[in-house]
Structure formats: C-alpha cells, structure tokens
Image: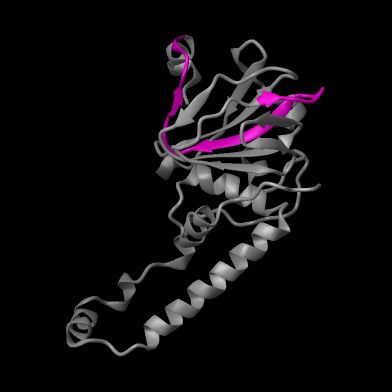
Amino acid sequence: MSIRHHIGDDTLMAYVNGTLVEPLSVVVATHLAICPRCRKSVALMEDLAGLLLMEAETAPLSPAEEAMADIIPSSASPDPGNDDQPLIKPDYSNTGVPMPLAERMPATLDDIPWRTLIPGISHYPLPKSGSQKNKGTLRLLKIAPGKTMPEHSHTGQELTLILRGSYIDDLGRFQTGDIADLDSETLHQPVADTAEDCICLIATDAPLKFSGFFSRLLQPVFGI
C-alpha cells in the first residue's frame, strides 16, 4: 500500500489533545493503523506534549495559583482512563478493515447493507457512542465506477479515508489508504476512476454544502 495523502498536522494535534469529535477521531485512528508516517508524527507530538506538561508541572506556582491548588482537591484532576479517544489497534479483524473501524462494522465490506442515496452512490451510517450521538456524522460511502458525487463544500471539517478503490477530484487522486483532510475552503466533486467500487470511510463535524439546486433538495435525504 502506497499512501500519498496524509492527515494534516492540525488534525493530528487535535487528535493527540483529544479535542476532535468522535467521528473524526475514528477516521484518524483507522488511518493511523495503516500509516507508519502519521503514527510517527503522532508519537512526536505526544512526546512534545509530555515535555511541555513536565515543564509546566515543575514551574514555580504564583501566589494565586498556590491558593487555587489549596482549594481544588487533587481528585479534580482529569482521569486519563476516561479518555474517549479511540485506541490505535493495527490488527485486522474478519471484517477486513483495521481497528477501530472493525468494531463498528455490521459485516465485511462485501456484505454491508448499503442504502441508496442516488443511482450509483450508496451509504451506510455507522454507530457512535451514547455521549456523542449528536456530534458529527460517521458513515461508509460507496461510489460505483465512473459515478460522480454531487459537487459540495463544507461548513466544518471532513475526513475521508479510502478503504477500497480510488477517486479523483480537483485535489488529486486518492486511493486505498489515502486520506483527504478537508475544511470549509474546499469545493470538490469526487469521481470514482477505476473499474471497482470506491468505498470510503467519511466523518464530518458539520453538514456539507451542496452546490446544485437538485442536490440541495436531496440533502435531508442524505442526512449529511
């Protein structure tokens, strides 16, 4: 697998800090399971964060900070065991996809009960945890060979990880393992450009913005 498109540094840092919404974190963790380069970047960021934390802990407290430390009990410190960020599990299950995506799959990629959006394009919403059900969307998307997604931009962030096949748009060609890290400045229209279905894992933290009138009418049906 030759990965040419990687996660942006800002997104990786947000992942390390635990500030990404759950759907985005799932896509990041799934990409990390198959991308040594991004895993290395995460390790460096974690090391840097650890050093900064150590420096902050050893720095002398001001009188005001000392007073606050006396008021706030040590039990108020965050419990690292409650971190909602998915763990990176680089092994594959019988679903044929990396963890943690495999934990949310109802079947293998070949047996997903796809729901048709428009002819040639199907999706399957994936479950989120109870605490974050209203924060962003997480779904699988399947684009038939030669089919084009409706042109759209974003009102927030979108992460798209290619699980099978490939697509091409104004940003380049994305194939298995590649990830598109997109923001509100991006306007694109992916086209599946091989003889097999292009299957993607997609997460957003805000609704998409479709360009065409007909596509905008369909947005409530898309649910994205």
For this view, does 15 lie left or right of residue 2? left
For this view, does 199 lie left or right of residue 188? right
Q: Where 194 sits versus 9, above or below?
A: above
Residue 27 spot, x, y in % from top left: 59, 44
Residue 188 visible in image: yes
Residue 3 spot, x, y in % from top left: 74, 48
Residue found at x 49% / y 72%: 49
**Colour approach in the figure:** one colour
Residue 106 visible in image: no
Residue found at x 56% / y 33%: 126
Q: Give the range drawn in magenta.
A: 191-213
Q: Where 145 sits versus 5, above or below?
A: above
Q: Where 43 sits versus 129, above or below?
A: below
Residue 123 spot, x, y in % from top left: 60, 23
Residue found at x 57% / y 46%: 26
Q: Nearer the viewer, residue 150 or 75?
A: 150
For this view, does 73 lie left or right of residue 16? left
Residue 78: name its quadrant.
Answer: bottom left
Residue 215 spot, x, y in % from top left: 49, 14
Residue 202 magenta: yes
Q: Which of 215 and 98 is in front in this view?
A: 215
Residue 188 magenta: no
Q: Nearer the viewer, residue 21 or 169?
A: 169
